[in-house]
Image (tube, rainbow, N blue to C red):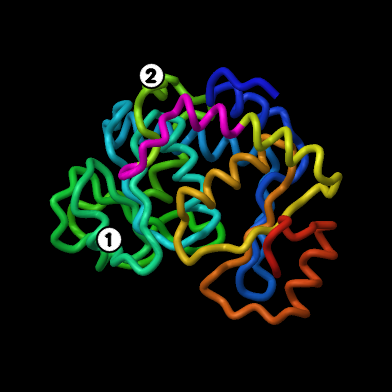
Amino acid sequence: MALNSLEQFFSALRSRQTPALLWYSQPGERIELSGRVLENWVAKTANFLVDECEVESGDTVTLAMPTHWRSLVIALAALRTGAQLQLLEQGQDAAGAAQSGEVCFAFDPEVLDGLEIDYPVLVDRGPLSPRYMGELPAGAVDYCAEVRAHGDVYSQFETPQANQPAFAGLSLTYENLLAELASSAQQLAEQSEAPSVQMSEPDFVTADYLKNFLELLAAGRGVVVLDPALEWEPTRVQKVLADEKAEVLPGQSS
């Protein structure tokens, strides 16, 4: 699979009617996003970043939020604009990671307290919340309320530059990210024919997790994401895998 740009990846994703992201949380909470719907959320969010938050290619976007279907959408959108994505490391304090950058996304308003950030953005954890359901601090932007008004097609006013780093603190450039994505996607496509795959979810989205997520999508797989904030009984995990006809990513355990 040859990939010349992230837009080529998102164009392929947009053509998929099959599940791309399957989110499980509290009993009864299941969110299914087809490739087309996932790309639509990413396009709207990328437009939100550029139009609402004035993000330009190379700017830093901080994701100070746990692994969640919304945080994955926002991470993909940041990469689509060519931003430098700042992700939390395991055990890192969320507020500490958000001290620099133009935009910071968080579920918790306390993370944004006292930060000198141009655009502090609050996101609601609710499955399909139309707005932030708590009290919105002064100066904060309500992602859930604002993102829906943005276009369904990404404007491409800001795009990745080949030699720019994709992740803050890492040397991986967008050019190298695309090369790794194409190579790994081909290998994954040859490993199994299972329509969906479940990975071990970190508490917070990491660069490695996000790269694996992109590779699986590029290979045409759906990704089952289990809310890491919950304790998952093995029997429930096995039921989810059976219901989704999913397998555990090789080298990991459920």
Q: Mark 2 falls on what kind of element?
A: loop
Tell me, yes or no, if residue 72 can be seen here.
Answer: yes
Between 209 and 137, the residue placed more toward the observer is 209
Density class for disc 2 (Cα within 10 Å; few <14, some 14-19, many ≥20) is few
In which image quadrant can residue 40 be found?
Answer: top right
Task: Give the x, y percent position of residue 15.
Answer: 71, 28
Residue at mark 1: 136
For residue 202, above or below residue 169: below
Q: Is residue 26 left or right of residue 50?
A: right
- Residue 108 sits in which quadrant? bottom left
Q: Secondary structure at mark 1?
A: loop
User: Residue at (68%, 36%) from the top-left corner?
Assistant: 185
Numbered range of the magenta stretch = 168-181
Q: Which mark is residue 157?
A: 2
Residue 59 x, y percent position in the rendering? 27, 33
Looking at the image, tell me whether mark 1 or mark 2 is earlier in sequence order. 1
In percent of width and height, residue 46 lies at 43, 33
Q: Which corner quadrant holds the C terminus? A: bottom right
Q: Residue at x 34, y 52 (%)?
A: 105
Q: Residue at x 85, y 65 (%)?
A: 242
Q: x, y percentage for residue 165?
A: 36, 33
Closer to us: 160 or 155: 160
Horizontally, residue 127 falls left or right of residue 146, namely right
Residue at mark 1 to residue at mark 2: CA–CA distance: 29 Å
Amino acid beneath label 2: Phe
Magenta residue check for 41? no
